[in-house]
Amino acid sequence: MSDETARVYYVDGDIVPADEASIPVTDRGFLYGDAAFETLRAYGGDVFHWGAHADRLAETCDVLGMDHGLSDTELRACIDETLAANNLEDAYVRLSITRGSQPGRLTPAEDVDPRIVVIVEPLPRGGRGSDPVWDGPATVQTVRTRRIPDRALPARAKTHNYLNGILARTELRVTGADEALMLDSEGYVTEGATSNLFFVADDALCTPSLDGPVLPGITRRVVLDLAREEGIPVRERRFTPDDVREANEAFLTNSTWELRPVETVDGISIGDGPVTTLLSRLYDAYVERQCYETEE
């Protein structure tokens, strides 16, 4: 669908035109960021790794203490209905669950009347021979804004309160970098504002471990599985910014970007390389097998 004015979204049980989609100002997702979400990608009409996304969404809701009462099957049906209503098979998908309207109180009520919102936008076909959605390799800049400690807000919880990432991204206005590299309170590397980080050093694929405030990305998990299957040594631990700046190659991952090579970190040239190229090719082949059902 090329006409954006014809796009429709799912809002609280109804399919509505995108320019008319709205929620009440008393919704807790609007008032307090009290809502869970997942960003997903559909390939060939199939929601990629829906089970893993559904599990992570359930974990976020558990962290929030939000018992919305909806099954994974019901949530998936909301996504499928929205994709079908837009005649989209390859798309960006964002699924949100808010606690609903509970005005005038910070403490949430135990009883939840959840509000479901699904937003979709077209993306190119994935898999073999696909074109990336990103515009060139990423420039990355280390920022002053630190990642929120897990004891304050668990990194595994994807909530509507994204101020930590927003503040990190606003720092990039000076340099014009594409992504922020965020550190934890002790100065170790965690992740980007909206991405997981990988780099290659000493012939090993390195990525910050989930022991720190790092989102357990779905794409991150797939990349690690592909690397291990290929026999690429993997190191998951704490790394310093210098470890990244001295890397042989680096890339970022998220559901929309898939694998995006890193061109520079803090102005230092990094670039992609054979490991990034190999894993990108393996990822495309994996998507092809999983979602487009073609023969090897």
Image (tube, rainbow, N blue to C red):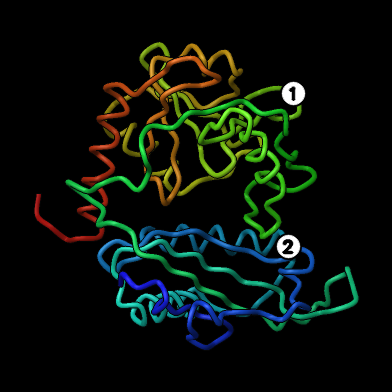
Amino acid of disc 2: Gly
Q: What residue is drawn where x is 90% and y is 77%?
A: 104
Q: What residue is drawn where x is 44% and y is 64%?
A: 93
The residue positioned farthest toward the bottom in the image shown = 14
Q: Is residue 128 left or right of residue 212?
A: left
Q: Residues within 10 Å of mark 1 (few under 14, many from 20)?
A: few
Q: Which secondary structure, mark 1?
A: loop
As drawn, 56 above or below 109: above
Q: Residue 228: horizontal and vertical position, in percent?
A: 34, 32
As drawn, 223 above or below 86: above
Read off the residue under disc 2.
33
Q: Which secondary structure, mark 2?
A: loop
**Nearest the eye: 202 or 175:** 175
Q: Residue 21: horizontal and vertical position, in percent?
A: 56, 80
As drawn, 230 above or below 200: below
Q: Which mark is residue 144?
A: none
